[in-house]
Image (spheres, coloured by chain):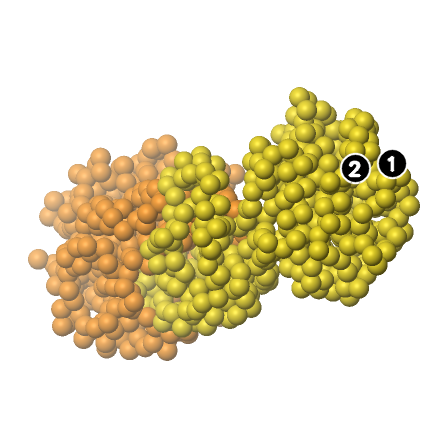
Chain colours: A yellow, B orange
Amino acid sequence: MASEKVLSHLEAHKQQHVQQLQDFLRIPSISSQSDHDADTRRAAAFVADELKELGLAVDVIDLGGHPLIYAETEIRPDRKTLLFYGHYDVQPVDPLELWDNPPFEPVIKEGVIYARGSSDDKGQVYTHIKALEAYIRTGEELPVNVKFIIEGEEECGGHSIYQYTEENPDKLACDAVIISDTTLYNEETPGICYSLKGLAFMEITVKGPAMDLHSGSYGGTVQNPGNALSEIIAKLKDEDGRCLVPGFYDDVLELDQDERDGFAALGYTDEILCRETGAPAPFGEKGFTTLERMWARPTCDVNGITCGYGGEGAKTIIPAQGLAKVSMRLVPNQNPAAIATAFSAYVKRIAPAGVEVEVTNHHNAAPVLVPRDSAMIQAGMAALEEGFGAKPVFIREGGSIPIVGTFQDCLGAPVLLLGYGLNTDNIHSPNEKFDLKNFWSGIRTSAVLMSKAAETA
Amino acid sequence: MASEKVLSHLEAHKQQHVQQLQDFLRIPSISSQSDHDADTRRAAAFVADELKELGLAVDVIDLGGHPLIYAETEIRPDRKTLLFYGHYDVQPVDPLELWDNPPFEPVIKEGVIYARGSSDDKGQVYTHIKALEAYIRTGEELPVNVKFIIEGEEECGGHSIYQYTEENPDKLACDAVIISDTTLYNEETPGICYSLKGLAFMEITVKGPAMDLHSGSYGGTVQNPGNALSEIIAKLKDEDGRCLVPGFYDDVLELDQDERDGFAALGYTDEILCRETGAPAPFGEKGFTTLERMWARPTCDVNGITCGYGGEGAKTIIPAQGLAKVSMRLVPNQNPAAIATAFSAYVKRIAPAGVEVEVTNHHNAAPVLVPRDSAMIQAGMAALEEGFGAKPVFIREGGSIPIVGTFQDCLGAPVLLLGYGLNTDNIHSPNEKFDLKNFWSGIRTSAVLMSKAAETA
């Protein structure tokens, strides 16, 4: 565990940490809006300056987008190395009128700080900086080598972090990557997310006549792309929601009993699901609980269908074409490229007569699985328990975080998703917030992790 | 046949008729655009004035929309009565930049007049006025009683004509309704359209979660309304395009051999279909030719699907809902209301689990069939042959003209669809045109029809 000196320092500087976080949050670093480019650079400088102040060697790396901040402490071969990843950019703030306070004027109410970026991700990435600071300011010997790679394009889909990671695996070499950009399991329960779903994102285009046709003049004579597209989509899944693409489940790693027991113990019910989503009922593959389907079963969902007339009233046409976007969320050990290929071949095969069908694979992300028994994961669990004062749980996530797969592939190190936010933090929405309790517990967790990681074999 | 005096008058006044038509076409009577309301009233006055000038009793009827013009000659009980229907309003002109000449400055090039409304319907309805004029100006005894009911809301979906017809069947009582608002079979061949398809227009709404959900966070746990809607649509028809709604074909009047032979003789080929539509191939119910399916088989076509994200790139959501518009084109003797009810019940029955499905029947139109052996139809065929100097054919139409059903129901008289336009007239599009040859032949046909109708038993 972290020394008493470090923990006392953290306890004594809680208010100062909040004030410093407020300074960070005042910078409107909206990476997707070019009129905020100067602000985004200012947020990068804020991070770089703090890390320089702590004595780290800092590189500001410009790969054509918003800069990456790379920083490292002294790298001693006798110490383990932790790489902390996060981002200093934030989401846009529209609709502004729904904010109770201006998004870049942080307000604290009842132990909660409200501001854009408070939870996603400035408040979370800042915990690691403050944890490191505690070691340095107290003169306590740092138990591990620490590296930071902090980006400014997470919210605008930039390529810099991918390019840098692929080109500089030695620079980023580490024993574990630590990412705090997700959530606790719930308000009382911290957790480590040890698996993320991957993604294969597809687009189906069905082309029929050269132009929209009058459904009276030509009805019955040509295939209707809207009907044809629906037939294709209907054949993607069976009536229980099981995907019918051949080979889809071949490489799915089944849950072990321990995982199923762990999920069951979390007490997630269909009532909770329906309350969260407003859906009339749960739905999905037989033989799995709702949480098992959510976290560990691959999916195939239409994200949108665009076809013909959608306005008010009637326009009785045979549409010239129909288009569907389909996302398949994949689980270990499915291969996104192979699944995308199988999907395309299947759609072509089931395509109805009388239309031309094109399938495009827009982008993929690999699923991620970190072995729960790895030493670093165990260190993370222990750190969470000390940091939050509550027993942590193992969780999985149905979403995809593409950079995690890139880190795993390029660095060969386990990635620890230590989320300090809450599902109710309104990230990407008005009134984004972050509980100060979780901010402080997160800092403590990071400090403890540095010492726990040092003790791993 | 019409007297030599009448025909000579028509021959002598061809250029004058064109000049008068140009005056009519210069009035931008776009009924759906309120800034053209004064123009639309001006077009009504143009028609009313011409008919008054010919000595008819004219009523301008205001039922809250654009006025109806009702006019009648002396009504003698010893004469048959023909009711001529048409409309003086026109379609909007956007996109204006695609017109070679301003839409309301008629230009004549190589025997064709270009202007909005030239074919739909000013040029066609005007033929009947000029035919009547020939009898009156030459002092030739009019062989029939003539009534006109000319409306100004055909292009904006107004209710006036329906209300007036339903409330005044005695006023409109006649032995036949004559409508010239459609087309010749082709450039060389006139025809009478003796059957129109009806319509049942439906909307299906599939509701799932209360808001769009993240397809990673909730994929696999709730039914996806986009997938569910596609399943419903896929079950509307079999793989040959035959509708699966129970009872759909029960009341379909099968084609007789004479009709099938007549269609076959027209020489419509799949090559023509693909050239006209740009479709890669013909498609539809087995056991019927393309023209039989187009004209005499009921259809079920998706007109549009609106669901989830349709923009560029990815938005990996489970859409909150999906919506489809579906038009069923119905044939004699299908009952639109009964079909709509069967459709709704079927869709509810096949609705997948986990979503709520609503079905709305927006509007219906009855199919129309005029017996080909009726005396008035035979008179129309004879008039076409004389007027156009070519043997006319019997044709049907896949589209619906709702007022035809209303005339049939309220007046109990056969409706003759004597179309003088061409499929290539660009009605509803830029560069609308009307062949002067067909304008003059149409006037002649109407004049001959007045005498042929008088001779019917």
Q: Which residue is drawn at 67% across and 64% down?
A: A409
Mark 2 → mark 1, Cα distance in angstroms: 10 Å
User: Which amino acid type is marked by label 2?
Assistant: Ser
User: Which amino acid type is marked by label 1?
Assistant: Thr
Q: Is residue B80 left or right of residue A74?
A: left
Q: Is residue B382 left or right of residue A45?
A: left
Residue corresponding to mark 2: A3
Q: Which of marks 2 and 1 is nearer the N terminus?
A: 2
Which chain does the numbered disc 2 sit on?
A
Discs 2 and 1 carry the same chain letter = yes
Q: What element carries label 2?
A: loop
Q: Which residue is drawn at 65% across and 34% down?
A: A388
Whether residue A366 is visible here, answered yes or no, is: yes
Q: Nearer the viewer, residue B242 or B212?
A: B212
Residue B157, image quadrant: top left
Residue B341 coordinates in the image, percent (x, y): 22, 45
- How many tags in the picture? 2
Query: Residue A406 — which label?
Result: none
Looking at the rendered image, the quarter that the C terminus of chain A falls into is bottom right
Q: Which residue is drawn at 80% across and 30% down?
A: A8
Q: What element carries label 1?
A: helix
Query: Residue A138 — which label?
Result: 1
Looking at the rendered image, the quarter that the N terminus of chain A falls into is top right
